[in-house]
Amino acid sequence: MEIVRCRDYEEMSSKAADIVCEEIGKRPDLVLGLATGSTPLGLYRELIDRYGKGTVSFKKIKTVNLDEYVGLGEDDAQSYAYYMRSNLFSHIDIAPGNTHIPDGKNADHESECSKYDAVIDELGGVDVQILGIGHDGHIGFNEPGNAFIPRTHRVKLTEETIEANKRFFERRADVPKFAYTMGIRDIFRARKIIFLVSGKDKAGIIREALKGPITPEVPASILQLHSNVILIGEDKALELLDE
Ligand code: PGA
């Protein structure tokens, strides 16, 4: 795994944007896997900035997001569909029809999951996947458990995830209890993974994920087996890796 150490969040975001733009340059119709949360916000700001300067176009790319809360629709300010629109899509030249996110409003989880799998299959899988990590080691919303779940599924969010994400909601009780998430197989099949990690609070889990055993109890640990992961992290998030 290539590890790129950055002095701060801005450098991490800018290095990630360099790679995304380079990949789009090589393949203008790239399938880009997208993540939400705080970590990729700086990357999205950089991409918007570069688009504004005319150095990149998203006209032909296709995107697939990792996950969505069950019960929230695209007009809910806490949904990931809303997040993507306000933090990236509405500021760049991407075609709305080329963006894909599970439909949190579809209560029929079996149909939603198989629909999303079909979307991923039709796109031929993800070329470049942006990935963060949760404090419990989740990637997407693949929470710790006793098996790696290969494809899109409905997942019960852990208390740790609900605790971490309550900052985006008015009350803790408002955080949805379930989410739809892309499965481990489809994340793992991405041809390149840009793994972003920021904040000192992630130092412990990133060490566990990269230096500990490969186990579904730490879903990100599966990335140890992937042959094309670039970990771009703030120094303080990577400080325990050398111990
Ligand atoms: P964060 O979330 O970027 O807001 O820390 C990461 C994640 O939960 O995957």
Image: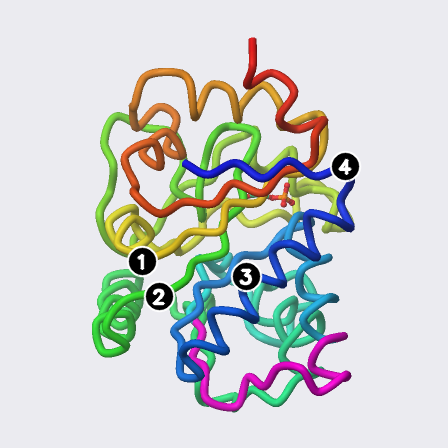
Looking at the picture, tell me which residue is in the foreground, 34 or 69.
34
Label 2 neighbourhood size at 10 Å, few (<14), some (14-19), many (20+)? many
Residue 83, percent from left and from top? 65, 66
Going from the N terminus, do you reach mark 3 or mark 4 first?
4
The residues tagged by marks 1 and 4 sit, at their Cα atoms, a distance apart of 27 Å
Query: What residue is shown with label 4?
Result: 7
Residue at x-position 51% and y-position 57%: 69
User: Residue 134, which numbered label?
Assistant: none
Query: Regarding mark 3 in the picture, which secondary structure is present there?
Result: helix
Element at label 1: loop
Marks 1 and 3, Cα distance to the nearest angstrom? 13 Å
Q: Which colour scheme is used?
A: rainbow
Tell us which disc is closer to us: 2 or 3.
3
Percent of width and height locating residue 98: 44, 85
Tag nearer the camera, 4 or 2: 4
> What residue did someone put label 3 on?
19
Q: Which of marks 2 and 3 is nearer the N terminus?
A: 3
Report the Cα–Cα distance between label 2 and label 3: 12 Å
The answer for how far apart the CA atoms under marks 3 and 4 are is: 18 Å
**Which residues make up the magenta segment?**
49-63
Quadrant of the frame with the C terminus: top right
Q: Give the residue type at disc 4.
A: Arg
Task: From the image, tell me which residue sits under label 1.
Answer: 191
Q: Nearer the viewer, mark 1 or mark 3?
A: 3
In the image, residue 214 above or below residue 37: above
Q: Name the residue under label 2.
A: 127
Amino acid type, callout 2: Asp
**Residue at mark 4 to residue at mark 2: CA–CA distance:** 28 Å
- Callouts 1 and 2 close, C-beta under 8 Å: yes
Residue that appears at 51% across and 40% down: 231
Principal secondary structure, stretch drawn in magenta: loop
